Image: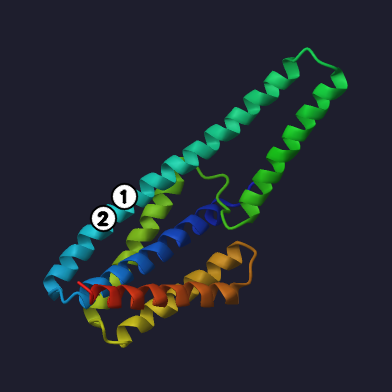
Amino acid sequence: MSKSKPSYNFLPALLVGLIEGVIIMLALACFFTGSGMSASKIYLSLGAALVFVSVLLGLGAYYTRKDELEQHEGESKILKIYQTLDIDENLRQAMVTDSVAEAQLWEQEWKEGSNATGDLSPKVYGLSILGGFLLGGLATILNCYFFELPDYAGLFFPFILLGVLGFYKYKFSNQKPLSGFLIISLSGMAAAFAAYYAGGLF
């Protein structure tokens, strides 16, 4: 099976990080605003949250990818065990063939699905998620600085940004890009409104 281009491989992970960064930081900004927090405390809290959550997601992505690779190595060891079993040759070959076919199917679905990052190392995968979250979060914080919430103008940029990111995320996943635009952007807005009104309860 031919490998995907490296630029293509890390982009889906970067997009996931960007989307998470915009949605989470926008929701936090709306929550802090709804709770009546002062502007200086909002930006300080957002900055701390940006660093903490980005590192947390990056580490999570790193160890998730590492576990996937270790699982794949485990499947290779199972194949070797099958080949040494003292059983009927036809049965042994059928077990090996079935395991290989299942592994190939999983790899194809992983690379062609929403997680088209099959060739990424754990380090690159984790850094892609971390970097994407930082970029998306910073863009959201800057937007909040120029368009103070709850001004609806402050939601226009995140809405369009999430739509574009969702468009390409679905496109890379071989899904309908327009659906991605609507689903991701509207999900982000729903989270923002819910967080704002939730903040008002405190």
Toward the right, the furthest residue is 90
Question: Quick check: marks 1 and 2 in contact, CB under 8 Å?
Answer: yes
- Secondary structure beneath disc 1? helix
Q: Nearer the viewer, residue 42 or 136?
A: 42
**What amino acid is at disc 2?**
Val
- The residue furthest front is 201
Name the residue located 38 percent from the left edge and 68 percent from the top edge.
Answer: 23
Packing grade of label 2 (10 A; few <14, some 14-19, many >=20) is: some
Q: Give the percent coordinates (x, y) of residue 163.
A: 48, 76
The dot on residue 55 is: 1
Q: Position of residue 35 (x, y in %)?
A: 19, 74
Q: Quadrant of residue 101?
A: top right
21 relative position to 98: left or right? left
Compared to 180, does 117 lie above or below? above
Tell me the element at label 2.
helix
Residue sitting at x 72%, y 21%? 82
Q: What residue would you read off at disc 2?
A: 51
Q: Nearer the viewer, residue 76 or 92?
A: 92
C-alpha span from label 1 to label 2: 6 Å
Against 175, residue 148 (above or below) is below
Q: Position of residue 124 (x, y in %)?
A: 44, 46
Instruction: Please say whether residue 150 is visible from this viewpoint.
Output: yes
State which quarter of the image contains the C terminus. bottom left
